[in-house]
Amino acid sequence: MASPQTLEIVKATVPVLEEHGTAITTVFYKNMFEAHPELLDIFNETNQKLGRQQTALAMTVLAAAKHLDKLATLLPQVTQISHKHRALQILPEHYPIVGKHLIGAIKEVLGAAATDDIINAWTEAYDEIASVFIQIEHGMYEEAMWQGFAPFTITEKRAAATDIAAFTVEPVNDRSKPAQDIDLSKLNLTAGQYITVKTDPKDSDHIALRHYSLYSASSEKGIQFAVRRDNRNEHHGLVSNYLHDHLEIGDTVLLSAPAGDFALNQNLVQQNEIPLVLMSAGVGVTPVLSMLEAQVSANPKRPIIWVYACQNKAHHAFAAEVDKLLEMAETVETHLFYFDSGQILDEAWLAKLPKPADIYVCGSMPFMESMIDGLMALDHGVDSVHYEPFGPKMSLGG
């Protein structure tokens, strides 16, 4: 536990962080990558360029400052971030590097206002926060289905929509090291999880890591995940285009073990009174498709409301798979929105959803922000709305 003096000083700096937080984290990343360019093998360059990573870190630091004396209240957010860290293979030895450059950035941005007392307090606070992450991540590493990045062979690659490729992979086991073999029949996948792909694209000087959601929690055929080609808004997705254009059946890809806490509330799966609302846009359908599969397999009697939005019919992902699963449910509502046809999923439509409801939402950052804000405005409680954005999670708040 941080000292009373540290708690007092850190909490007193909250207004400063609110004013300068993103500036501090921007300087932090710049200085850290200059000193440790090898860390660019871990961090998503796209999120850096768009400012998402800086915003997420600023919000995390701000939340920690406000709750330093009761960090347990931040456990859900810490757990979400720790899942990402474990999937990316962020290790305890990385934390001192982050701490050094974060404190240095505070000094650089605040200048003379960063007194010795403030710097000492924040150094102690960072060590406290880092120890919480390291402890939680230690447990996640121990529970992971395999360690590090393991090789998998692509056994199937197909188009799930005009811009989405669905991959199925099987482990490449080394007969000389049977203790490290991955047995698909023994994998305990959870609907809503994601895997992390490690690639070495020719168009980059660095290793590139990306998270992709499982579209099925069954490992009978292998591990199944989907990748959207990211070429929108003049952006050329480094990894997504590499996977679409250069990897084919028979090729090998490196994956870290499934991670994530975006999962169905198991206390409600067997109940029939509270409907399950699965709401997604574009490739955000991937994790909620696995949830639909899990729900109808466990209890087809539960009412399901399926809500999906995308650009047009050509971009409608996994349409046949969804229809087949929905046919297994006894009570279903299906609502489709094609943006090109002027069909808008907005707060006015959200008002039609029943209350209470168990709601799961996934899609782009703008979609997530719109849906969550709308649901909160309609008094759907925070315990009833679950989400998995495709970006740094803390940038949506919390």
Image (spheres, rainbow, N blue to C red):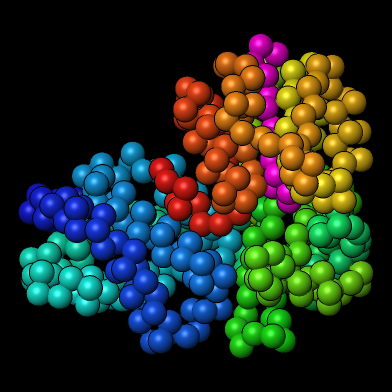
Q: Is any atom of residue 260 visible in this view?
A: no
Q: What percent of the width, then of the height, locates residue 396?
A: 47, 48
Q: Quadrant of residue 171?
A: bottom right
Q: Is residue 51 above or below residue 136?
A: below
Q: Is residue 200 above or below residue 11?
A: below
Residue in front for this viewpoint, 159 or 262: 159
Where is the C terminus found, in terms of image quarters?
A: top left
Q: Is residue 347 rendered to the left or right of residue 303?
A: left
Q: Is residue 304 above or below residue 389?
A: above
Q: Is residue 84 rendered to the left or right of residue 290?
A: left
Residue in front for this viewpoint, 379 or 93: 379
Q: What percent of the width, then of the height, locates residue 136?
A: 43, 52
**Residue at position x 60%, y 83% from top?**
206
**Is 114 covered by the magenta stretch?**
no
Residue in front for this viewpoint, 350 or 293: 350
Q: Is residue 142 rendered to the left or right of residue 175?
A: left
Q: Quadrant of residue 287?
A: top right
Q: What percent of the width, then of the height, locates residue 336?
A: 78, 34
**Residue at position x 29%, y 61% from top?**
21
**Residue at position x 56%, y 78% from top?**
41
Residue in front for this viewpoint, 77 or 112: 112
**Residue extending furthest top?**
273
Point out the stretch of residues depicted in magenta. 272-287
Q: Is any atom of residue 49 visible in this view?
A: yes
| Numbered disc total | 0
**Residue extending furthest front?**
342
Q: What percent of the width, then of the height, locates residue 365?
A: 57, 51
